[in-house]
Image: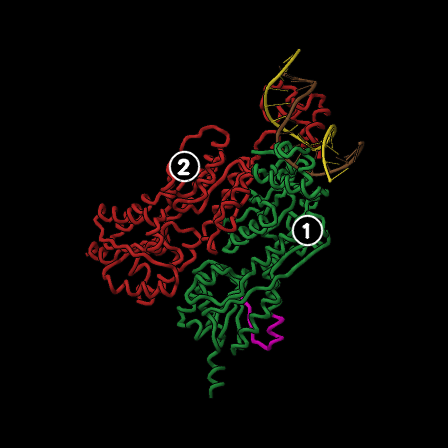
Chain colours: A red, B green, C brown, D yellow
Amino acid sequence: MATIKDVASAVGVSVSTVSYALNGTRPISKAKKELILKTAQELRFRPRAIARSLASKRTHILAILFPALERGLGLSEIDLITQAARDALGRGYHMVIWTLQTDDEEELRELLAQELVDGIVLMEIRNRDWRIPVLKETDIPFIILGRDEAAPGESYIDVDFFDTMMRSISYLKGLGHRQIDFINQSEKSFRDGYGPVVRTHEAFEYFCGNFDIDGREYFCGWESEAVRSRTISLLSERQGTTACIVMNDKALPGIIAGLSGQRRRIPEDMSLVSIISSAGAASFFLPALTSFEMDIDAMMEAAISQLIAKIEGRYAELSTRLIPCILRERDSTGMNMVTRDRMVS
Amino acid sequence: MATIKDVASAVGVSVSTVSYALNGTRPISKAKKELILKTAQELRFRPRAIARSLASKRTHILAILFPALERGLGLSEIDLITQAARDALGRGYHMVIWTLQTDDEEELRELLAQELVDGIVLMEIRNRDWRIPVLKETDIPFIILGRDEAAPGESYIDVDFFDTMMRSISYLKGLGHRQIDFINQSEKSFRDGYGPVVRTHEAFEYFCGNFDIDGREYFCGWESEAVRSRTISLLSERQGTTACIVMNDKALPGIIAGLSGQRRRIPEDMSLVSIISSAGAASFFLPALTSFEMDIDAMMEAAISQLIAKIEGRYAELSTRLIPCILRERDSTGMNMVTRDRMVS
DNA sequence: CTGTTAGCGCGTTCAT
DNA sequence: ATGAACGCGCTAACAG
């Protein structure tokens, strides 16, 4: 492989001139610059990433950091990761995956001490996440996907849950629904103060009031058989509900089975909106589910560009962004029959 | 951050001695060695990955390479990626993700020319995959997940489809089933010679003969509504089938809906076995599906260890391995009623 | 505008 | 068993 030296001697200039010409770090006479670029091309010269890093103290490598998960990532994480890698690559950065074996600080410290990466994307953030203080000890830039209420002052990108809930309710109201159930995730995660659960909880309450909706929230695990029977009992416990918002991908099969077990058709008898779900999950079902999906491309674009901006020192200020979801109307929602009949008559 | 120099002067020896002590490259007197290790510890010295790489010509970074996919990876890819990263990390290697923007050779060449990685894991392999010749041009070690029939002589790790089909049929026969359908993937992928589709096709034919099973294979797309109606017509077209093997995760919702539309209960009227599916997909349904799942941990363990062995020059020979699937009995399979009744009477 | 040169931090050969 | 010195390929002061 050709080195910068080869190019230099081929053109008859010094290595620094070549370096400057290639990086545009310093003005070079037009003629020479073009000649250098041309010869570099011909010699198929590529700066060796490692050598460049050693000299410039910048590796052009980012890391995406996962905690040890209790087996099984959701359906959208794959898109997040690959999209992040792709975005980074498009900007000249590589992306490494760091999946920590355990919630072990020492392991993370080891990784950081190697100084292999220029910046870090933190995923699967939890409240009072132990990783944040560790990262702050070093001066390595990082960005958070999600929010840690206990760590104000950190830059983050998150889903706009408030907006999503508002639009969900508004959408269903537009279809004539007046009594709406909201199936949230587990009560435990609510008590733990897990961001998405808490924020949608608050938003649901707020907007039901605002839109004059008779709403009710249920917490729910995800073990399919349990969810099904729970759904069935809910149905009899509270009559008159014609629409349901679900933020719980894993509970969906149980809910749908429960509905069908009670002879409630979707969407004729019950409209279903899945929120914060992945495209894959929502279109997996029959009927395909109307959903508000995370705008993964936008989130990652924002995350990577902000992270790189920090690395390159363009602005180090706190930056926070909320990304709205995208509504995909599919086959699980329809007009409230009662309302429709009233309108017809 | 402390450098090797700091350690050397702190102990009062030369840098090379420290290097040797740390890497065990050369015998060092016991006393000094221990002192050096201790001081390094105290100074929190970590060899800078980049500097080490430049000198040793080895980066301890691997890449996992994806082609540009037509939107949406399956449910098991996420596990494959994170497991690969974790395995690598456990062996002292970082894993970067390379998702190519397009099927563009030049992009891959650029990446390779940077000499950032020591080895490559090739995923989503296709027949006559264009990436293999490109990789062979360089002398960088790589390993294939899957098989490319058109590239004999390359090391690979793949699912043991033959074994899986044998065990599936055997398992169902043990439950008394004698007439079995096999729902494969699309006919197009079969004609394209896509490995999994072709191999299961052959295995199904072979083992039906072997086990004296009345088997029939169907190719099938994945658009849910189409799959459902297809399933319904299949049911009437061929009576007497009591069990069904499916290698098509995305078609599962349609198949299940079609079955229930014809009032066939699972597993009372029809046993369902999902093969080569991910744990997530199979347990997502209600009833949860009995399945032969990819042994992702074993596959990745094999892949990474073989790749690293090649890198470290332990053996450069061709190595191929077929990994059997793991049977998970869930709720979608049961005794063939006809057989059972006969046994009872 | 351009060339010279000193590192970047570590591995490793050559001496001793 | 140990140290000095060189080199990996490139960037960025420091000089003109």
Residue B85: x and y in percent read 56, 49
| Residue B115 on the magenta span | no
Label 1, on which residue?
B309
Viewer-nearest residue: B73 or A204? A204
Q: From mark 1 to mark 2, how far is it between C-alphas?
A: 42 Å
| Residue B212 on the magenta span | yes
Q: Is residue B300 above or below residue A263?
A: above
Residue A61: x and y in percent read 55, 38
Q: Is residue A74 above or below residue A34?
A: below
Viewer-nearest residue: A308 or B37? B37
Say which quarter of the image contains residue B100: top right
**Kind of residue indicated by mark 1:** Ala
Q: Chain of mark 1?
A: B
Label 2, on which residue?
A154
Q: Across the whole image, how many numbered discs are drawn on residues?
A: 2
Q: Marks 2 and 1: in contact by CB < 8 Å?
A: no
Residue A125: mark in rendering:
none
Quadrant into which the N terminus of chain A falls: top right
Q: Which residues are magenta?
A: B205-218
Say which quarter of the image contains residue A184: bottom left
Label 2 residue SS: loop
Would you say B216 lies left or right of A132 here?
right
Quadrant into which the C terminus of chain A falls: bottom left
Q: Chain of mark 2?
A: A
Quick check: can you spot residue A51? no
